Amino acid sequence: MKKLLLGLIISALLVYLSFRGIDKKALWEALRRMDYYYILGTFFILFLMQLVRSVRWGFLLAPLQPISQRVLFAITSVGFLAIAIIPARVGELARPYLITKKSEIPMSSALATIFSERLLDSITVLILLAIAILVTPLPSWLVKSGIFVLSFTVITVTAIIFVYVKRELVFHRLLSGKNPARGRWERLIRVIERFVEGFKIVTDLRGLALAGILSLLFWVLDIFSIYLLLKAFHLQLPLIAAVVIMLILLVGIVIPTAPGFIGNWHFSCVIGLSLFGVPKADALSFAIVYHFVSMALIVGLGLVFLPSYAFRWGEIKNSMRG
C-alpha cells in the first residue's frame, strides 16, 4: 500500500511537470494535426515486438522444456498486462508463474529465463547507447546510467556463467552431510539450484545467438515505432532522435510510479524531445499518443488471453517457495 501511494505521488508530480507551462491550444492543435496512418503503423510494429518477445522467450526456455508459441504468446501478453497494471513491477512474476502451469518448469527456473531476457536487453541497449554517444551529444546523467548498467551487466553475466559451470561443485558442498546449515537451508538452496538451472541457455550457443539476434530485432523495431510516431506528428527529426527517446524512456520507466507508467512515460518523452528542440506542447502530444497506443496494445492483448491464463497474487507468492 505504501509503495502504491508513493507511486501515485511520483506520478502526480511528473504529470504536473509534464503539463506545467503547456499552451493548451498548441497541445490540442498538435493532436488534431497528427497523421493516423503512421499511428496504425506504430501499432502494428508494437504488435510485432510482442511476437518477437515471445519467440525470444521460447529460445531461452527451450533447453529446459520446449513450449508452443501459441502458449508463449498468450502468457507473454497476460504477463505484460500484469506489469502494466500492478505497481512496483511485481507483475514481472506473472509470466514465470503462468509458464509453470503449462509446463514442468519450476518457478525459480522460469524466473531465471526472465532475468536472462533482461540481460540480453541490457546488452543490446548498451550497444545502441554507444552508437548514440558517437552520433549525438547526450546528457551526462544518461551516459552515467549506461556506465552503471554496463558494470552491473558484466559482473552479473560473469557470475552467472561461473556459478552455472561450477554448479555441481557449489551445490554438492552446500548440501553435503558435513554442512551444519544443511537442515535449515536445504529448501532455499534447492530453490537457488533450480534458479541457476534456468540459465541453461548458456550451454546452447545457437539458441543464445538466436535470442541475441531477436533482442536486437526487438529494439530496432522499438526505434522504428518511435520514428513512425514522430512522423505522425510531422516532426522532421533524424532516426537517432528515436534512439535517444527510447534510451531516456527506458531510464524513466524504472522510476516506481502509478500503474501504467503514467507520468514517468510522458515526462521522459518530453525530456528526450526537448534535446532536439521540439516545443513542449508537441513533445507532450507525442508522449500522450505514444503512451496510449502502447498501453492499448498491452491491455488489449492481455485481456484477450486473460480468461484462459488468469492468476492470483497469492498463488504466485506460494509458488515462489517451491
Image (cartoon, rainbow, N blue to C red):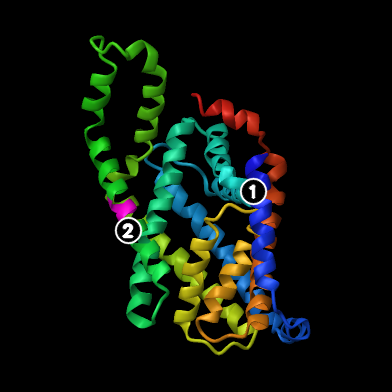
- Position of residue 317 measured from the top left corner of the image (x, y, whole percent): 58, 29
Which residue is at 59% across, 32% downward? 316
**Amino acid beneath label 2:** Leu
- Position of residue 209 measured from the top left corner of the image (x, y, whole percent): 32, 56
> Mark 1 packing: few (<14 Cα in 10 Å), some, or many (20+)?
some
| 23 horizontally vs 320: left or right | right
Magenta residues, start to end: 150-154
The mark that comes first in sequence, 2 or 1, is: 1
Asked if 120 appears above or below 127 in the picture, the reply is: above
Kindly identify which residue carries mark 2: 150
**Amino acid beneath label 1:** Leu
- In-front residue for pair 278/234: 278
SS class, disc 2 = helix
> Mark 2 packing: few (<14 Cα in 10 Å), some, or many (20+)?
some
The answer to whether residue 263 is visible is: yes
| 68 horizontally vs 85: left or right | left
Asked if 181 appears above or below 289 in the picture, the reply is: above
- In-front residue for pair 170/261: 261
- Secondary structure predominantly adopted by residues drawn in magenta: helix
Is 303 a magenta residue?
A: no
Q: Quadrant of residue 27?
A: bottom right
Q: Quadrant of residue 38?
A: bottom right
Kindly identify which residue carries mark 1: 6
- In-front residue for pair 44/34: 34
- In-front residue for pair 36/61: 36
Which residue is at 52% across, 56% downward? 254
SS class, disc 1 = helix
How far is disc 2 from disc 1 in space, using C-alphas? Answer: 29 Å
